Image (spheres, rainbow, N blue to C red):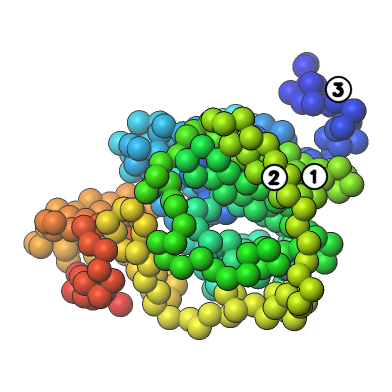
Amino acid sequence: MTNRYFKQILLAEIGEEGQKRLSSASAVIAGCGGLGTVIASSLVRFGVGKVTIVDRDFIELDNLSRQVLFDEEDIRRGLPKAIAAAEKLRRINSEVVVEPVVADLTAENIEQLIKGTDIVLDGTDNFETRFLINDACVKLDIPWIYGGVVATYGMSFAIIPGTTPCLKCFISELPGPGSTPTCDTIGVLGTAVNMVASIEVTEALKILLGKQDALIKKLIYIDVWYGTWSLFELKKDKNKCSVCDDRQFVFLEQKKGTRLASLCGQNAVQISPPATTGISFKDLASRLASSGEVSYNNYMLRFTIEPYEFTVFPNGRTIIKGTTDESMAKTLFSKYIGV
Ligand SMILES: [Zn+2]
């Protein structure tokens, strides 16, 4: 029988020994959008033993222009991204353990989700989550691959705690809301996403193969439209870094409690109450039936009361579409879902 990994085993860079290492390795992908779907598809096809996908969102039509694991049927079925991705990935390679986690990556759950994994790959779209990943990876001594893309350009850097600069070493402060362009404000080209995801995965493979010497060790900047490929040396600041030198993990040590976040460019607010043991969608649906239109499956409940649309997840996390006003969202949440 043909070995499915035949052509990568032929590579001097991987070989039989490398393939064995990959099959016993594990990776966590934070976010399963444009970057995350390409990363997940590559890691699973490569035969990385266990791949965990963490994503809070569900699939929408405008995702299909670049999020390679999803299709129109997934939208009709109302599937969360992590679940739809896992279904496809298991069909691609049943030898890989694929674990979908439908959740927002937060200070409360990140350590539990990444503990014991060999690597974390960045498929997120915001710096707050990246700073949280950086805190957790430095604390737990787990390598992670930073990657970001917008418009036609993007960048990536492999961070190995104790060896390379960490994210905080080269981005000293969290950029303010609205201060950086996002894919929702200026757009994004799918081919740029694919390139950055491929760079992230290639750097991750080197780490999983134990070939850290082969890492590029520089910030890689690429623009597919203008043909730019630049490498920037990143050095640790003369000043001590609060994260990797002083081990102050301010994003990880946020106080617990309900958190609200406006979802950039989506006219929506996300409300994350402290995790509950699970909401009964059946009970909630019957309570809401007289107020508006309700439907639910195993993964989410949708409730529409014009002009708002609620998407409620089993742990209580709720996305309210139709407003960017956080206090309004909180009011709506208390009114219809309750805490
Ligand atoms: Zn640092």
Which quarter of the figure has residue 91?
top right
Residue 245 left/right relative to 249 = right
Q: Gap in Å between the C-alphas at discs 3 and 2? A: 27 Å
| Ligand 1 neighbours mark 1 (CB distance < 8 Å) | no
Q: Position of residue 265 (x, y in %)?
A: 33, 53
Q: Position of residue 271 (x, y in %)?
A: 35, 68
Amino acid type of disc 3? Leu
Q: Position of residue 172 (x, y in %)?
A: 63, 70
Quickly name the residue at label 2.
Answer: 220
The residue positioned 48% from the left and 81% from the top of the image is 256
Amino acid type of disc 2? Ile
Report the image quarter containing ligand 1: bottom right
Residue 249 left/right relative to 103 = right
Residue 10, numbered label: 3
Residue 204 left/right relative to 188 = right
Circle 1 Cα neighbour tier, 10 Å, few/some/many (<14 / 14–19 / ≥20): some
Q: Quadrant of the N terminus?
A: top right
The label nearer to you, 3 versus 2, is 2
Is mark 2 in CB contact (under 8 Å) with mark 1? yes
Vertically, is 182 above or below 42? below
Circle 2 Cα neighbour tier, 10 Å, few/some/many (<14 / 14–19 / ≥20): many
